[in-house]
Image (spheres, helix red, strand yellow):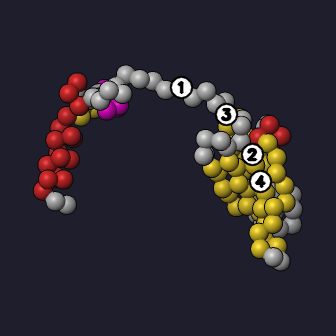
Amino acid sequence: MLRSNRKRFWNSAAQMRISAGGRPKFNKRSRGPWAGIVVKSLVKSLTCRYCNLRDRMVVLRCRDSHHATLERVLFPLQSLQFQFSDQGVAEVWTHGRGGAELLERCSMHELSC
C-alpha cells in the first residue's frame, strides 16, 4: 500500500466514528451532497418456493428488470425458498444433449407461497 493511500485511509477512518447503535457516523465535513437522502425501494418482494420434482439436476435462474439475479443448482427432490422482486422471471435450465436447455419459464407470482 502506498503512503498516500495509507494516509487517505487513516484520514477517512479518523473522520468516521461508530455511534452507540453500531452504525457509522460521519462528521459534517465528510458528508457529500447525498447526505440525508433516503431511497425507498418501490419494488415489492415475494416469498417464493421452487421444488425440483425432476429426476435430473436443474439450475434455477431468477432475473428482474433491475438487474438483480439469483442462480441456484437444485438436485432432484430438493426445494428452495427465497425472496425476490414481484417483477422477476424464473427460468429452469438443465443440461441436454446439445448443451443447456430451457425447461420452464414462469413469473414470480406463480412461485409465490
Between residue 23 and residue 39, name the one nearer to us: 39
**Residue 91 visible:** yes
Compare marks 1 and 3 and give the one earlier in the sequence: 1
Main SS, magenta residues: loop
Amino acid at circle 1: Lys
Q: Nearer the viewer, mark 2 or mark 3?
A: 2
Compare marks 2 and 1 and give the one earlier in the sequence: 1
Q: Nearer the viewer, mark 1 or mark 3?
A: 1
Mark 4, residue position? 91
Where's residue 97, x and y in %? 83, 77
Amino acid at circle 3: Ser
- The crowding category of the residue bearing disc 4, from other C-alpha atoms within 10 Å (few below 14, some 14 to 19, many at least 20), is some
Mark 2, residue position? 89
Callout 2–callout 1 Cβ contact below 8 Å:
no
The magenta segment is 20-24
- The crowding category of the residue bearing disc 3, from other C-alpha atoms within 10 Å (few below 14, some 14 to 19, many at least 20), is some
Where's residue 25, x and y in %? 29, 29
Q: What residue sits 81% from the left and 61% below the top?
A: 102
Mark 3, residue position? 45
